[in-house]
Image (cartoon, helix red, strand yellow):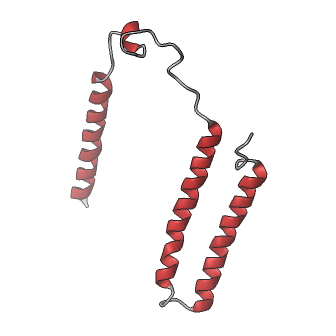
C-alpha cells in the first residue's frame, strides 16, 4: 500500500511539474500585430477572417452525437438476445427507445430541429 501511495504522489508531482513548465515556456513574450493578423497572399484581407459559427448547426451536431451514442448503446441488446429472458430484453429495449422518443420530442418542442429559422 505504501508503494502505491508513493508512486501516486510521485506521478502527481511529475505531472504538476511538467504542466507548470509547459505553461511557463509556452507564453509568447512579444506580441506582433502583423504576425497575429490573417494572411492572404501578402495582401490585407478583404473581409473578416472570423466567420460567425451557426448555433443551430452546433445544436444539430450535438443532437446527432447524442443519438449516435444511444445507437451504440442499443446494439449490445441484439447480442444479449439469446442470453436474456425475452420479457426483460423487450422491456429494457422499449424503455430505452421511450427515453429516445421523449428526448426527440423535447428537442422538437423546444425548436432545436427547426432548420428554417
Quarter occupied by residue 33:
top left
Quarter that holds the C terminus = top right
Work out whether 115 lies above or below 37.
below
Question: In the displayed structure, does residue 84 sit left or right of residue 13?
Answer: right
Q: Quadrant of residue 31?
A: top left
User: Number of callouts in the render?
Assistant: 0
Extreme residue in the left direction: 3
Q: Which residue is depicted at the point 40% across and 16% down? A: 40
Q: Is residue 45 above or below residue 2?
A: above
Front one among 39 and 32: 39
Q: Position of residue 5 (x, y in %)?
A: 27, 54
Q: Quadrant location of the N terminus?
A: bottom left
Q: x, y (%) of residue 22?
A: 28, 29
Which quarter of the figure has residue 55? top right
Counting from the top left corner in percent of width and height, residue 76 is at: 48, 76
Q: Viewed as shown, does residue 8 lie left or right of 55?
A: left
Residue 40 relative to residue 52: left or right: left
Q: Camera-side residue: 11 or 5?
A: 11
Q: Is residue 112 above or below residue 2?
A: above
**Vertical arrangement, residue 115 with respect to residue 3, above or below:** above
Residue at left offset 66%, top offset 65%: 100
Residue at x 50%, y 20% (from the top left corner)? 49
- Which residue sits furthest right? 109
Q: Residue at x 65, y 71 (%)?
A: 97
Q: Position of residue 4 (x, y in %)?
A: 25, 57
Amino acid at each position: 500500500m505504501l508503494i502505491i501511495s508513493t508512486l501516486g504522489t510521485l506521478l502527481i508531482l511529475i505531472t504538476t511539474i511538467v504542466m507548470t513548465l509547459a505553461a511557463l515556456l509556452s507564453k509568447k513574450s512579444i506580441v506582433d500585430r502583423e504576425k497575429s493578423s490573417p494572411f492572404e497572399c501578402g495582401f490585407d484581407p478583404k473581409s473578416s477572417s472570423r466567420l460567425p459559427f451557426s448555433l443551430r448547426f452546433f445544436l444539430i451536431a450535438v443532437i446527432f452525437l447524442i443519438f449516435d451514442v444511444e445507437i451504440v448503446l442499443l446494439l449490445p441488446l441484439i447480442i444479449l438476445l439469446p442470453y436474456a429472458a425475452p420479457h426483460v430484453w423487450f422491456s429494457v429495449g422499449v424503455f430505452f427507445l421511450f427515453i429516445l422518443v421523449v428526448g426527440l420530442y423535447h428537442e422538437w418542442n423546444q425548436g432545436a430541429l427547426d432548420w428554417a429559422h
